[in-house]
Amino acid sequence: MVGVAKPILLDIPESFETERLLIRAPRAGDGAVMNAAMAETIHNLRHWLPMPWCQNLQTPAETEESVRRSSALWILREDFRFGLFRKSDGAYIGACGLHRPDWSIPQLEIGYWIRASVEGQGYVGEAVAGVNQFAFETLKAERMEIRCDSRNDRSAAVARKAGFTLEATLRHNDTTADGSALRDTLLFAMIKDQYFYHKEHGVKAT
């Protein structure tokens, strides 16, 4: 039998590390540092992400409320938002999440954003690789997905570099972030056998 019958009973570590990052579950009190990163970066996010917090900057209190709701969803095993903290100085530099889990497979979708001041330093790729490993090795995922606007070349490059396969272009399946037009979505995916083959044979993502 495939799938996870009662995901709420899974014992899941709330943090792990990559070379430069501490990647951990949301905690009460994270709202202030997250809000500061969002304020610095919202001009980039608003073009690609339709979520309300990407279109209009939240207050620190609203972000703190969101953090605490995310913590509750983590406990319920309904969503996994990770904060990205730079190990060298503890700075909050963005987020990388595992969203829309389908425990009957299991499969999840990776989302990510990075604060503007550290763009181009490889942190997104490092975080995605770490979260993908966490999904396959800790959560026992069978399939992982990354979806992005077909015009978002930088996001698509992250998926390709992480070793994901472009499975489809979903034509006019969503609206642009501002709701003004229809858009296409790129669907990238990786399955468990692919992940472990790459790991066993030392295949590097490109």
Image (cartoon, rainbow, N blue to C red):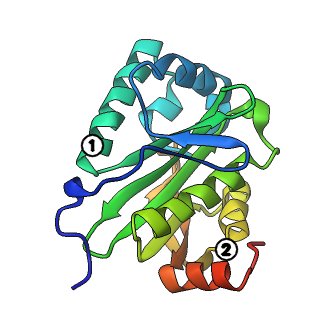
Mark toward the viewer: 2 or 1: 1
**Residue at horizontal 50 percent and vertical 80 percent from the top:** 191
Picture coordinates of residue 38 (x, y %)? 58, 27
Give the residue number, with chain letter if any, for mark 1. 75
Residue to which mark 2 is pinned: 163
Amino acid type, callout 2: Gly
- Residue 26's place in the image compared with 2, above or below, is above
Which part of the image, by quadrant, shows the C terminus?
bottom right
Q: Earlier in the sequence, mark 2 or mark 1?
A: 1
Position of 112 relative to 116 (above/below): below
Q: Quadrant of residue 165?
A: bottom right
Q: Nearer the viewer, residue 103 or 48?
A: 103
Tell me which amino acid carries mark 1. Answer: Ile
Q: Is residue 57 left or right of residue 65?
A: right
Q: Are marks 2 and 1 in contact (CB under 8 Å)?
A: no
Where is residue 169? Give x, y as percent: 55, 75
Answer whether residue 127 is visible to the viewer in this image: yes
Total labels drawn: 2
Which quadrant holds the N terminus?
Answer: bottom left
Q: Is residue 47 visible?
A: no
Q: Is residue 4 above or below residue 72?
A: below
